[in-house]
Amino acid sequence: MSEPATDTPPPPSRLETLADTIGTVCGERLHRVASIASELTFEVSPSQVVEVCRALRDDPRLSFQTLADLSGIDYLTYGMDEWDTHSATNSGFGRGVAGPGEVETPVAPMERRFAVVYHLLSVNLNQRVRLRAYCDAGEPPLIDSVVEVWSGANWFEREAFDLYGILFRGHPDLRRILTDYGFIGHPFRKDFPLIGHVEVRYDPEKQRVVYEPVSIEPRTLVPRVIRDDHRYEPALNGRAAGAPGKPNGR
């Protein structure tokens, strides 16, 4: 005998319960955004980053005591497609970049180009959340430091400064951490050339490392295109057309 159907909705998932709790604690200071892989992501105003992070850390229902990671993002070319085609042809893919002697169209400046992403972890409650905050418009991009909330943010913010040029207001020691002392520019920016501007080598005559203009020839990388040619003919790989089994009799 089957049980009678009921209109009782299923209980909320653990993720949705966490989202409701965060909404209760932070209110309108956070805006939930779409995410993938069952991960929870919120967007926060740059002026409220420190305040929201402190609330997420101190509220016992959340207890995000650990900043697992902090990274920068450059949205300069976000949503732009550099390919003319989406499928392979006899001549491969068509790429929508400037050829030899041509000039690429400059990318227009964006109001919200740079952002900082915070990955928070609660060890005792076994839960995670991701925050995203866009930096203040202008150059250089600027946002408040969260070192006073999580001391481990120190090196994370130095890395984001080094690679993206993001300045963290209130950071106690904002210096480069990965590139050389005399490095110019920020290599993870989308407008920074992949080959860089300079290269280094050891000069045996001067007995020191010297900097020189980069000598690498820029080139456009294209994906590998696989085509059906004579190597795939049944007569050559040991299979009859449509016959089961592995090629080459293995």
Image: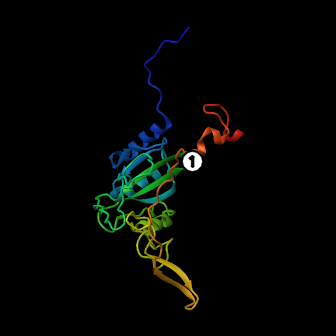
The residue closer to the viewer here, 224 or 128, is: 224
- Are there few (<14), some (14-19), or many (20+) residues within 10 Å of tag 1? few
Please tell me whether residue 185 is drawn above or below residue 64 in the rendered image: below
Q: Would residue 62 be found to the left or right of residue 42 on screen?
A: right
The percent position of residue 109, horizontal first and vertical second, equals 28, 62
Looking at the picture, how far across and down is residue 80, in whole percent?
A: 35, 53
Q: Amino acid at mark 1?
A: Asn
What residue is shown at x 41% (from left), y 46% (from top)?
86
Q: Is residue 214 above or below residue 192?
A: below
Query: Residue furthest toward the right?
Result: 250
Judge by depth and name the residue closer to the eye, 76 or 50.
Answer: 76
Point 46% across, 68% down: residue: 158
- Coordinates of residue 47 in the picture (x, y in percent): 33, 58
Q: Where is residue 212 drawn, in percent x and y?
A: 47, 81
Against 34, residue 199 (above or below) is below
Instruction: Give 26 or 129, whichever is nearer the viewer.
Output: 129
**What residue is shown with label 1?**
124
Q: Quadrant of residue 25?
A: top left
Q: Nearer the viewer, residue 202 or 84?
A: 84
Q: What's the residue at 37%, 65% (across, down)?
A: 191
